[in-house]
Amino acid sequence: MNITITDYIVLVIISGVLSVLLAIYAYFMKTNFSGTKAFIWSSAFSAIYTFAFVFELSSDSLQEIRFWLNIEYLGLPFIAPSSLLLVLHYIGREKFAAFRRGWVLFVIPAITLIMNTTNDYHRLFYKVLYLRENTPTPMIDIFPGRWYFVHGAYTFGCLLVSIFLLVVHTRKSSSVYRKQNFTMILGHLLPMLGALFYVLGMTPLGMDPVPIVMCVTSALYIWAIVSTGMLTVAPIARDHIFESMRDGVLVLDLSGKIFDYNSAAIAIIPSLSPAAIGKTIEQVWKRGADTGVFEGDLNDTSKQEYEHELKWIKGGETYYYRVRSSKLLNTKGEIAGRTIVMIDMTEHMQLQNKLRRLAEIDGLTGIYNRTHFMEIATEQLRQARINHAPLALILIDIDFFKSINDRFGHSVGDLAIHHVVSLVKSIISPETSFARYGGEEFVLCVPDTALGQALQTAEQLRQKIASTPLISGSHAISITASFGVTEAYQSALPLESLLHEADDALYFAKRNGRNRVIAAGSIEPQSESAATVTRV
């Protein structure tokens, strides 16, 4: 036997052994990668093809060659579609690779197997099959039949589609998976080129180079499995988990430069783009630098992660994020970088603020309700006593409010309440706590204010209300209010008792003509200019 043929046979045997080893390894390997079965079948079909091809090369007659050729086609037609299934799983298109759809890929290979086996009856696969002359070992030549071209076109089509899908996927994949992607691409491209050279008659002695090429591709797969975790960590994990996460994720390297990010991060940081790779987060997003949410020392081993709260006003809307930074460790347990997860808390905070508002704010007026006022005023009273500072309480009641409701209706009554609230808010300081105390009754807690100053404020409010009628439709409705004022300076009375004093003063004002300001403990009105309200 010619030494060239012998060497070729040895290489083909090695290729077959590698295919068997890959199939066995994938079978026993513990992995969640859904394409493992497709990889096993592809390797098994490759092993059948290569070992049968070895026996074909070592055959001594046309009849023996024809027998092993039939064995080859138990594997050869199914390699390309199995590889396509593997690629579909690899890029995350499992729904197309599932059995209910994936079986369609094997219809033509199954027909090819039948056509090859029964060729003597129809000659649709090989028109003529004969021994070649002047060869160092018996080799065959063929005149292809019609189905041979169908088989060839289908095989090339599967390989081309696989390569196309891998190339498109590589452009979108993280650089972490580039080695795997390129290995997969070469694993499909090299056999296709080998088959093309064989069809064009450009191979030594006219022998099929694909089994030798499979030796190279098997070696590439072994290298990828060992070095990049192929079949264990596939890019689909990134696409289905990393990309589908609602939270924005940034991956930074040891120097703090952006290594990867997901689509949710782009929604949060619009300046993120492929050009951001290799830049620091501060260069890409000034907001992050200004707020300090991305600060963190990777060399600080005292904590593995930290969190920051971020409030961001963008386009007139307020967004809330919880930014969590964690150290990223490699397989050796060494720090390889940092992951930053930006959790959108906007909806949660809006709901929380809404619930807080419902618990604290009066629904009609938008000022504090009585319950929340009592909490705030209690704390302000406590601080006033600690600081030995004065504090005043002012109760306000709209005069003849029932008459407004009876004459103009409750909707106008609500407008009257809004009207008084807006007038009061236009005068009081931001430090003053303002609440709706009852139906048409309101209360003010004025820190750092003695009784005299509080009476002046109350008188100013009384005059403002009395001089500003409510305009409703064609009506100008005059509104007045009565006031009761008390002071907590050097008084040990609790808030409830102080409010009771102010309430007594208020009712004294209402019993003595209304539209008046009365201080707690007083007998006469504090404002001589106070007028009797004109009834509406």
Image (tube, grey):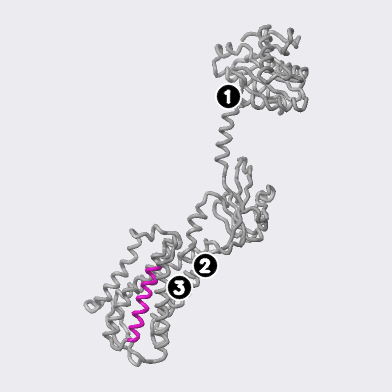
Q: Write down the quadrant of residue 89 in the picture.
A: bottom left
Question: Where is mark 3, residue-wise?
Answer: 189
The image quadrant where one finds the C terminus is top right
- Which three-letter amino acid code belongs to the residue tagged 2? Thr
Precedes in sequence: disc 2 or disc 3: 3
Q: Is residue 49 magenta?
A: yes
- Which three-letter amino acid code belongs to the residue tagged 3? Leu
x and y percentages locating residue 261 in the rendered image: 57, 56
Q: Write down the quadrant of residue 484 in the picture.
A: top right
- Which three-letter amino acid code belongs to the residue tagged 1? Leu
* Above or below for 195 versus 376: below
Precedes in sequence: disc 1 or disc 3: 3
Q: Residue at x 55, y 49 (%)?
A: 247
Question: Where is mark 1, residue-wise?
Answer: 364
Q: Are marks 1 and 2 in contact (CB under 8 Å)?
A: no
Q: CA distance from mark 1 to mark 3?
A: 72 Å
